[in-house]
Image (cartoon, rainbow, N blue to C red):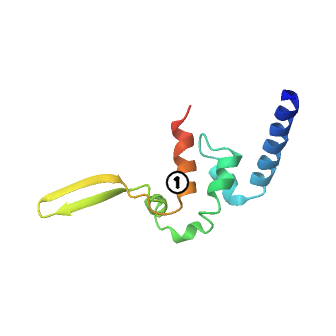
Amino acid sequence: MSGSIIERIRALDARARAAANQNAMARLFMTAPGVGAVIALSVAPTYDDASRFRRSSSAGAYLGLTSRRYESGEISRNGRISKRGDKLTRTISMKRPTSS
C-alpha cells in the first residue's frame, strides 16, 4: 500500500510541475531558491498583474509582510508584521523558507 501512495505523490508532483511550467508567473517564482511548483502555483494567482507594484517592497506590503509603524510625538518604532492581505499566500510564502 505504501508503494501506491508514493506513486500517487509522484504523479501529483509531476502534474503540479507540468501546470507550473505552463504558467509564466509560476515559472518566474520558481527561479527563486526554495520555491517549487506547488508554492509557485499557490502564490502566482495573488500576483496576477505584477505591473501594479511599483517596487518590490510594495509586493511584500500587499501580503502584509511589512512591519507596522508606531509613531507618537518623539516615539517611532517598528512593530510586528501587519498581516494584511491574503493569509494563505502569506503563510505559504513564509513557512517554506523557514522550514528545513
Comparing 38 with 27, the one in front is 38
Residue located farthest toward the front when viewing the structure as drawn: 1
Residue at point 64% right, 47% down?
Answer: 31
Residue at point 51% right, 46% down?
Answer: 94
Residue at point 58% right, 49% down?
Answer: 92
Residue 91 lies, in percent from the top left, at 54, 50
Judge from the rendering whether residue 78 lies leftward or rightward of residue 58; answer left or right. left
Residue located farthest toward the left when viewing the structure as drawn: 74
In the rendered image, which quarter contains the N terminus? top right
Quadrant position of residue 61: bottom left
Q: How many marks?
A: 1
Q: Is residue 24 above or below residue 54?
A: above
Residue 55 lies, in percent from the top left, at 46, 63
Of helix, strand and loop, which one carries label 1?
Answer: helix
Residue at point 54% right, 40% down?
Answer: 97
Judge from the rendering whether residue 67 lies leftward or rightward of residue 28; answer left or right. left
Judge from the rendering whether residue 38 lies leftward or rightward of residue 5; answer left or right. left
Circle 1 residues within 10 Å: few <14, some 14–19, many ≥20: some
Residue 59 lies, in percent from the top left, at 49, 61
Q: Which residue is mark 1?
A: 90
Residue located farthest toward the top when viewing the structure as drawn: 2
In the rendered image, which quarter contains the C terminus? top right
Quadrant position of residue 95: top right
The type of residue carrying mark 1 is: Arg
Q: Is residue 33 above or below residue 3?
A: below
Judge from the rendering whether residue 88 lies leftward or rightward of residue 9; answer left or right. left
